[in-house]
């Protein structure tokens, strides 16, 4: 045994011994640094950075970002409840999503969210009706679908005509005019979001330029906007991707917003948490199949869905380097699905009982976990220097069954 992987100053085997596996491990410093990169790159524009809660809604992570000055981007009443429970401010929270329910709109209005990012005409009418019933005025921004190809996985591309998101560019002026005619709405801004894991800046810049054309058209019609929200963040390195440079992005945005009185808002998720986390898992068995070998681990697609859902690549590394012969194998979990894989054809020098670190697991990992195969949700731990603290307990089977047992008829 030589090198042992650490999270900050803590050896990963210590965390596995203390909390068991599978285990999500996050670095406080990496969270702070990732946010710092945005704050630094965009400093001259003084933006409101609204962390996209869907990437990782753990309360301790939300609290950390709230204390560092973040606002939040939410897509459900549940996420708003998380933000509030973590000490975040509703007044710095924007509510996105195509299917906001009456109950969610009511809750968000009562809590006083910064604005609703509205995605359709019926949603405008619904928000107006709820606001009228509550005797309130709802701040709204229209999410415009700029029909720009984000050049990402089709499941996470959101800014094309064929996608369900946003109001078509061609319909935008009429939608704003309709919003302006509704007495319980107050138009505050415009936004777009074209997709996630973006490895190229040009679609982001193109979308911004399209939005600014609309801003000018609206101004000419007497509809003045106060803010522009340019959507999610840039992609992250999972393997060896080239990812956009934040300073170059900020510069491109600054050039295009120069001379305009528009407050800038951003909704990054993945790039604030993705590489601040890993999933720690233990090898159960090594199975030599007829066609290939399998490293069977105690984490599965219910803990990390991205490989199964998007064929996503996450780097997988033994926690302790061993001088044994490596094998080439698929890294798979115990779930009864052939699609339950965490990595394919990986070369690994491992034995049963060894720990593996699955990297880039801070975003869209714990937040997309499920109980499939009645697997309890894994614990989450936050590391800070030499210290570590549990930020979500491992679920028990008893907790998992409780809700159903309470409804069991004789
Ligand atoms: C509306 C909205 N905002 C923000 C985000 C966060 O995007 P990302 O994690 O790529 O920064 C998403 C996810 O793609 C989203 O749908
Ligand atoms: N869940 C996706 C990102 C979704 C972005 C939400 N609009 C992923 O893991 O890459």
Image (cartoon, grey):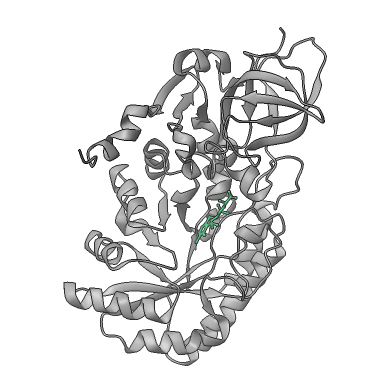
**Which residue is pictured at 65% across the width and 53% down the height?**
247
**Res. 274 visible in picture:** yes
Quadrant (top left/top right/bottom left/bottom right) for the N terminus: top right
Q: Quadrant of residue 155?
A: bottom right
- Point 37% across, 76% down: residue: 123
User: Quadrant of the rendered structure where residue 209 is?
Assistant: bottom right
What residue lies at 60% left-to-right and 75% top-to-bottom? 146
Q: Nearer the viewer, residue 27 or 343?
A: 343
The spot of residue 337 in percent (x, y) is 61, 39
> Can residue 260 be seen at all in this image of the molecule?
no
For residue 112, side relative to residue 370 (left or right): left
Q: Give the image location of residue 293, x and y in percent.
A: 77, 26
Image height check: is 206 above or below 199? below
Question: Left or right: 119 with respect to 321?
Answer: left
Residue 249 x, y percent position in the rendering: 65, 58
Depicted 326 relative to depicted 344: above or below: above
The answer to whether 80 is drawn above or below residue 253 in the figure is: above
Name the foreground residue: 121 vs 341: 341
Q: Quadrant of residue 113?
A: bottom left
* Up-down relation of residue 410 to residue 142 (above or below): above
């Amino acid at each position: 045994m030589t090198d042992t992987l650490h999270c900050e100053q803590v050896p990963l085997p210590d965390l596995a011994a203390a909390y068991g596996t599978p285990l999500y491990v996050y670095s406080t410093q990496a969270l702070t640094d990732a946010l710092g990169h945005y704050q630094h790159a965009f400093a001259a524009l003084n933006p409101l950075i609204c962390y996209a809660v869907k990437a990782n809604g753990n309360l301790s992570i939300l609290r950390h970002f709230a204390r560092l000055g973040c606002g939040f981007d939410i897509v459900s009443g549940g996420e708003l409840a998380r933000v509030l429970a973590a000490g975040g401010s509703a007044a710095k929270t924007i509510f996105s999503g195509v299917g906001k329910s009456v109950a969610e709109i009511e809750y968000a209005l009562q809590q006083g969210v910064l604005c609703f990012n509205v995605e359709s005409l019926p949603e405008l009418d619904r928000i107006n009706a709820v606001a009228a019933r509550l005797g309130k005025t709802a701040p709204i921004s229209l999410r415009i679908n700029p029909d720009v190809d984000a050049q990402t996985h089709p499941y996470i591309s959101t800014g094309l005509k064929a996608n369900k998101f946003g109001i078509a560019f061609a319909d935008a002026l009429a939608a704003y005019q309709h919003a302006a005619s509704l007495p319980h709405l107050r138009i505050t801004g415009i936004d777009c979001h074209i997709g996630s894991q973006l490895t190229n800046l040009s679609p982001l810049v193109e979308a911004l330029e399209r939005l600014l054309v609309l801003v000018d058209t609206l101004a000419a019609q007497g509809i003045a906007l106060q803010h522009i929200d340019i959507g999610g963040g840039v992609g992250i390195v999972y393997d060896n991707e080239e990812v956009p440079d934040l300073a170059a992005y900020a510069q491109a945005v600054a050039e295009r917003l120069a001379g305009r009185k528009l407050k800038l808002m951003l909704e990054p998720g993945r790039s604030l948490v993705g590489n601040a986390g890993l999933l720690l898992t233990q090898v159960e068995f090594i199975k030599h199949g007829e066609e290939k070998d399998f490293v069977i681990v105690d984490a599965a697609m219910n803990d990390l869905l991205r490989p199964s859902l998007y064929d996503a690549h996450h780097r997988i590394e033994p926690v302790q380097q061993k001088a044994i012969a490596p094998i080439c194998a698929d890294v798979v979990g115990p779930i009864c699905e052939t699609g339950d894989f965490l990595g394919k054809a990986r070369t690994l020098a491992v034995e049963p009982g060894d720990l593996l670190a699955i990297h880039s697991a801070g975003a869209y990992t714990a937040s997309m976990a499920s109980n499939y195969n009645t697997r309890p949700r894994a614990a989450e731990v936050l590391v800070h220097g030499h210290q570590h603290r549990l930020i979500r307990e491992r679920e028990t089977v008893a907790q998992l069954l409780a809700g159903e047992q309470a409804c069991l008829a004789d």
